[in-house]
């Protein structure tokens, strides 16, 4: 196994003869591998990067300031535009937070509808993460394969709410509309078709020896470091920390998954839950490296299929309504509430402070990618330039959520 | 451990650093004095039975009503609150700490209020404190690199303060 350190040491030996100067390289904000408008300033010595400074804010749209001027339901479209690859999960996070403040319990049917939608969104989001990661590492085909399937999920979402990217579908009290007739059958047909396709992804990337060489042993993050930096989602679990808010979170959120059978995707004794179906961990991979973060995402796609199937059963047998009606200008009770949910990219937190009027006094979004990105300076120190896209890509960031 | 036990334990260990306690609200919170914050935080992180090793979020909330006619509606006196949401990965418990500051340091208008930085306790705080500084205008004493993070570096003012006024123009770009 060749670790980063050994490789950089090798490089230094090579560069001993050819004298090099330190150079500042600007990567981004228009670089395709920075996943949006992220700018990294790299201090390089030949091929070795000694320091990385991320600069953010290119996509800052003052979402929190806008939130202080709109009612919670009016702010839902703005949450869509935070993590624009998982708009449904953002809608859900904010809705749950406001419901916690209002002490509003959604009907049984709405609860299961939310699970269906949130988990379908997780699949769509991880497909982009997977496809774009292949693209970062120079393999184009997985991207097309991933988008082929994602397109079908977007078609389903379009049928449910009319939008393909910024949905505003889940809202305070439940959802804006019920699922249309025949939707569940289409969703089930998609899941049946999708399940065998996952093997293709594993054949294209997970077991691809070039892919393994590019990301196994690269960007290794210890569990302590991941916790200390506030990483979450697949980035945290890829380091072996057993934390998934769907199981461990606050009751307001875990209520939604009450009675669902699922196992948190985290490595235990060299194995992942249910990984016998898929290629196992290659000997080159180290816990906490880019490969593990990628693999956790891939297994979560499989897990999401099971969750959607369970939710479809429950949703079909529920008899109540898809949502509790909430007025657009409904007065919020005085107080404050903070709630974190497990979005595809990690723990998305919302904090709402109310002074008793219909408009929140303060609306705050805690972004998961913001914390996940903050480790880059430390992860990228003393790596090769070519490894930087591999590390940034494995964090699977969305700038819309970081800059808000 | 119940919230009440935790509060009495903190009060015993830190005395005056622990201020008002609100256990009835949706998310129970404990007020900590600005100067006592790092010690309390380190204690909360390092005690094996507490182990709040995960800092979820730092938010700045500005309580102020610029319109004197509506000022009476404000809940309490004008102040800036810095809210810390903590989480324990091993015990799956959460805790909310608040530091309540005057809106301006020593009531001198234009001088930002100060809180000691906790970036050396949780690395999450590094960027979060930069964000709170940028948007809510709180100075974090001892922060390794307190620069603006979301707004441009030459931006004037702190947009989430309630008395903030949008500039007329920025580098020749009309703002309002």
Image (spheres, coloured by chain):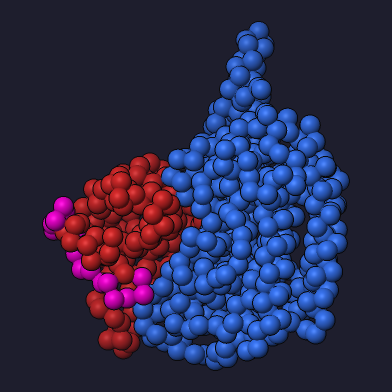
Among the 4 quarters of the image, the one containing residue A52 = top right
Q: Is residue A151 above or below residue A390?
A: below
- Judge left or right: residue A399 versus residue B141: right
Q: Quarter of the image containing the N terminus of chain A? A: top right
From which residue to which does the magenta span run?
A: B12-27
Q: Is residue A142 above or below residue A160?
A: above
Residue A346 in the image: state x and y as whole percent: 57, 56
Residue A183 in the image: state x and y as whole percent: 80, 78
Q: Residue at x 79, y 44 (%)?
A: A202
Chain B is which colour? red
Chain A is which colour? blue
Residue farthest top in this picture: A17
Q: Residue at x 31, y 86 (%)?
A: B73
Query: How many numbered discs?
Result: 0
Among the 4 quarters of the image, the one containing residue A290 = top right
- Judge left or right: residue B47 versus residue A214: left
- Residues A4 and A33: in front is A4
Q: Is residue B30 above or below residue A50?
A: below
- Judge left or right: residue B127 versus residue B63: right
Q: Is residue A175 above or below residue B61?
A: below
Q: Is residue B15 magenta?
A: yes
Q: Residue at x 72, y 62 (%)?
A: A305
User: Is residue A318 in view from this perspective?
Assistant: yes
Q: Residue at x 67, y 28 (%)?
A: A284
- Judge left or right: residue A37 versus residue A211: left
User: Is residue A176 in view from this perspective?
Assistant: no
Residue A357 in the image: state x and y as whole percent: 42, 87
Residue A157 in the image: state x and y as whole percent: 76, 73
Q: Is residue A36 magenta?
A: no
């Amino acid at each position: 196994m060749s670790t980063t350190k050994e490789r950089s040491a090798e490089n230094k030996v090579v560069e001993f003869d050819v004298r090099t100067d330190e150079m500042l390289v600007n990567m981004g904000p228009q670089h395709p591998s920075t996943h949006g408008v992220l700018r990294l300033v790299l201090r390089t010595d030949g091929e070795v990067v000694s320091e990385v400074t991320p600069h953010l804010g290119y996509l800052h749209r003052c979402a929190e300031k806008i939130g202080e001027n709109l009612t919670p339901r009016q702010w839902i479209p703005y949450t869509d535009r935070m993590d624009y690859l998982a708009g449904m999960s953002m809608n859900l996070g904010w809705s749950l937070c406001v419901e916690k403040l209002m002490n509003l319990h959604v009907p049984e049917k709405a609860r299961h509808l939310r699970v269906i939608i949130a988990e379908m969104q997780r699949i769509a989001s991880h497909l982009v993460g997977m496809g774009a990661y292949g693209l970062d590492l120079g393999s184009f085909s997985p991207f097309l394969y991933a988008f082929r399937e994602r397109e079908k999920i977007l078609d389903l979402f379009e049928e449910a709410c009319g939008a393909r990217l910024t949905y505003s579908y889940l809202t305070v009290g439940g959802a804006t509309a019920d699922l249309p007739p025949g939707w569940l059958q289409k969703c089930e047909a998609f899941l049946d078709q999708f399940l065998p396709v996952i093997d293709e992804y594993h054949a294209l990337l997970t077991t691809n020896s070039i892919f393994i060489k590019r990301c196994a042993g690269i960007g290794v993050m210890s569990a302590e470091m991941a916790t200390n930096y506030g990483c979450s989602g697949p980035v945290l679990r890829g380091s072996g920390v057993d934390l998934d808010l769907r199981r461990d979170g606050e009751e307001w959120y875990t209520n939604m998954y009450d009675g669902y059978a699922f196992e948190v995707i985290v490595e235990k004794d060299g194995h992942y839950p249910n990984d016998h179906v898929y290629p196992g961990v290659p000997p080159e991979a180290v816990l906490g490296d880019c490969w593990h973060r990628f693999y956790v995402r891939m297994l979560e796609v499989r897990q999401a299929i099971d969750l959607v199937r369970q939710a479809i059963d429950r949703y079909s047998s529920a008899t109540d309504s898809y949502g509790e009606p909430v007025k657009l200008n409904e007065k919020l009770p005085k107080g404050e509430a903070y709630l974190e949910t497990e979005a595809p990219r990690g723990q998305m937190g919302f904090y709402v402070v109310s002074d008793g009027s219909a408009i929140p006094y303060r609306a705050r979004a805690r972004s998961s990618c913001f914390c996940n990105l903050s480790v880059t300076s430390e992860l990228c120190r003393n790596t090769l330039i070519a490894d930087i896209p591999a590390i940034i890509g494995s964090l699977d960031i969305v700038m819309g959520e970081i800059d808000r | 451990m119940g919230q009440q036990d935790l509060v009495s334990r903190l009060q015993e260990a830190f005395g005056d650093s622990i201020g008002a306690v609100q256990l009835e609200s949706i998310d129970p919170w404990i007020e900590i004095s600005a100067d006592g914050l790092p010690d309390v935080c380190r204690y909360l992180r390092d005690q094996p039975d507490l182990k709040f090793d995960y800092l979820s979020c730092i938010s700045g909330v500005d309580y102020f009503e610029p319109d004197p006619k509506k000022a009476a509606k404000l809940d309490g006196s004008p102040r800036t609150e810095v809210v810390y949401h903590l989480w324990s990965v091993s015990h799956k418990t959460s805790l909310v700490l608040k530091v309540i500051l005057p809106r301006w340091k020593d009531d001198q208008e234009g001088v930002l209020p100060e809180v000691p930085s906790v970036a050396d306790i949780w690395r999450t705080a590094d960027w979060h404190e930069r964000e709170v500084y940028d948007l809510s205008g709180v100075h974090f004493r001892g922060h390794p690199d307190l620069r603006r993070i979301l707004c441009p570096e030459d931006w004037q003012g702190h947009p989430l303060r309630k008395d903030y006024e949008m500039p007329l123009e920025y580098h020749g770009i009309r703002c309002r």
